[in-house]
Amino acid sequence: MEKPVVIGVVGTHSTGKSTFLARLAHELRRGQVQVATVADLGEQAQRMGLPILDNHTWASTLWFVTRGISEELEAWSHADVVLVDRAVPDALGYYRAALAYRDEPLDPQACALLEMLVRRHSVHYDLLFHTTLEPGIPLGQDKTRSSDQRFRHLAGQHIDRVLHEFGLAHENLPADGHDHALRTAVQFATAHLSDPTTVVES
């Protein structure tokens, strides 16, 4: 199977990930690009009774990581570009943030599997965006979100640490930077579809 262009977004909740990806999908489809989107798994996890947000556990995080990987791979077969709302480093960042929020120690041995899966799968992201927390922007009401600002900050910090710890190149995505990021992502995807060896300057 030929791998499509894979673009992921990570970041703490209610920072514009889904909105940005919806706009990006629209722009790519206008250019006749076949797009598949892997949605945020939070609502699916809730329906299954899995703990999320500041209640994340090792087991729920493993579910997020493995289900996310599975859904991404399924999307590879029927798209030129796959857009991922919460790429897998996001789940590991949230788990670490939940442990910090609950003041629970991180067990390195328990985390080894999660870290290995995230590290190895993340090489498949061709372009990653990390949204920026803007405290003045209110929480969206369309999904279940933690309104605890301390946890929101922790999630953002720990996702950032995962990106840097694993050496994952990424573009920062502030709330007022969507137009620039859209141009970057469309140019990147278009260039790579025509020539996968192309390097695009952001």
Image (tube, helix red, strand yellow):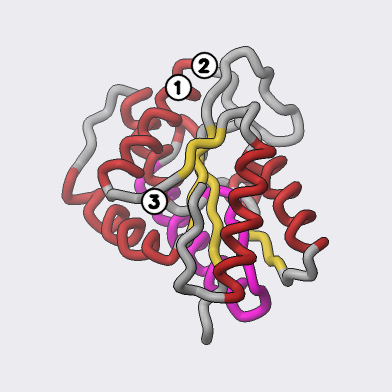
Q: Is residue 61 magenta?
A: yes
Q: Which residue is drawn at 61% across and 80% down?
A: 77
Which amino acid type corresponds to the residue marked 3 in the rendered image?
Ala
Disc 3 packing (10 Å; few <14; some 14–19; many ≥20): few
Q: With respect to residue 75, does 91 lie above or below? A: above
The tag on residue 153 is 1
Which amino acid type corresponds to the residue marked 2 in the rendered image?
Gln
* Location of residue 178 (image quadrant): top right
Disc 1 packing (10 Å; few <14; some 14–19; many ≥20): some
Q: Which residue is drawn at 70% across and 51% down?
A: 24
Badge 1 element: helix
Q: Where is residue 48? Give x, y as percent.
A: 60, 52
Residue 99 visible in the current orientation: yes
Choose the circle earlier in sequence order: 3 or 2: 3
Q: Name the residue under label 2.
A: 149
Q: With respect to residue 100, does 115 lie above or below? A: below
Front residue of this view, candidates 109 and 80 = 80
Which amino acid type corresponds to the residue marked 1 in the rendered image?
His
Q: Where is residue 41? Give x, y as percent.
A: 59, 51
Please provide the residue range marked out in magenta: 57-86
- Residue that protrudes farthest toward the right in the picture: 30
Front residue of this view, candidates 109 and 189 = 189
- Residue that protrudes farthest toward the bottom in the picture: 1
Disc 2 packing (10 Å; few <14; some 14–19; many ≥20): few
* Mark 3 or 2, closer to the camera: 2
Residue 74 visible in the current orientation: no
